[in-house]
Structure formats: C-alpha cells, structure tokens
C-alpha cells in the first residue's frame, strides 16, 4: 500500500508538525491501518473503497481510493486543531509526487468533509475523523 506510505510521509514532512511517520523512531505518531496499543495521541490512516478505476489518455490506470484519517488526541480540543492541520496539509494536492515513493503521480487529494467529532475513546482521548478522495 505505497499510497498510504506516501500520505504518511506528506504528513510527516509538513511544516505544521503533524506527526512522525518513520518506523525507526520511538516517537512515531502516524500509523497505517492499525491503531497502536498506546493510550496517547496518534494519527491512523485507513483506506476504504473509492470510485472505480479510470484510464489516462495513454491507457494508464488511474486509481481512486478514499482515505479515512483518525486523529486520537490528549489535547484539550480533542484533536480538532490537528485534524484541521491535516486538511491544510493534504487538501487540494494536485499533480504531485509525495516523496516516499517517486513512482506514484498524484492527480489530486481532496478533503470530503470538515473534521467530524467521534467522541472520546476508552482512555478519555478525543477522536476526530476526516475523509479524503485520493486520485493517483
């Protein structure tokens, strides 16, 4: 799932200090497809079904997955500002490569909603979610 790694890297390198995606760091805060067993703050990227595939003029496949970003936060605002920062970082990316793998060209990444409050989890952390349409 290279595209999820690309999105994680884009969040990692953002000047907004969104999170850490490197696998070698003990301070990792961005995870892919699995919520960590930690009780602290984290971001989890989940893929889900998007639009059917399309085709470019030169018959290359265009993939259209959707992305759910879960923000789990110990902050007083429950993660609302972090979710807003994620939208600022990812929304309206166009015709770009995102750094982790230079093989995928992203036509667009578009936010599908404002951050949605999901309530507090069993640890009392706030949970927000944001969904994106990804085209690459």
Image (spheres, rainbow, N blue to C red):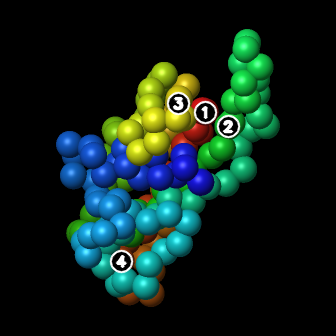
Q: For mark 1, does the 10 Å Cα neighbourhood hold few (<14), some (14 to 19), or many (20 or more) residues?
A: many
Left or right of 46, for residue 17: left
User: Is label 1 in contact with label 3 (beta carbons under 8 Å)?
Assistant: yes
Mark 1 vs mark 3: which is more N-terminal? Answer: 3
In whole angstroms, how far apart are the C-alphas of marks 3 and 2?
Answer: 10 Å
Q: Judge depth for marks 3 and 2 and give the one in front.
A: 3
* Residue 117 appears in the picture as rendered: no
- In terms of depth relative to the viewer, which is nearer, 64 or 105? 105
Real-space Cα distance between discs 2 and 4? 32 Å
What residue sits right under mark 1 in the picture?
135
Q: Which residue is mark 2?
A: 64
**Relative to 49, is 71 above or below?**
below
Q: Tell me which numbered mark, 3 or 4, is placed earlier along the sequence.
A: 3
Report the residue marked by disc 4. 125
Residue in the image at 73% along x and 14% along y: 58
> At 27% across and 44% down in the image, what residue appears?
14
Q: Position of residue 9 (x, y in %)?
A: 37, 49
> Which residue is at 27% across, 46% downward?
13
């Amino acid at each position: 799932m290279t595209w999820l790694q690309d999105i994680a890297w884009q969040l990692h390198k953002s000047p907004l200090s969104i999170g850490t995606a490197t696998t070698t760091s003990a301070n990792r805060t961005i995870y892919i497809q699995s919520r960590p067993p930690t009780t602290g703050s984290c971001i989890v990227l989940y893929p889900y079904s998007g639009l059917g595939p399309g085709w470019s003029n030169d018959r290359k496949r265009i993939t259209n997955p959707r992305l759910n970003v879960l923000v789990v936060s110990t902050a007083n605002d429950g993660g609302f500002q972090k979710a807003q920062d994620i939208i600022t970082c990812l929304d309206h990316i166009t015709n770009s490569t995102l750094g982790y793998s230079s093989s995928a060209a992203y036509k667009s990444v578009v936010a599908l909603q404002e951050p949605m409050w999901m309530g507090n989890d069993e640890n009392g952390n706030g949970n927000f979610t944001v969904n994106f349409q990804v085209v690459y």
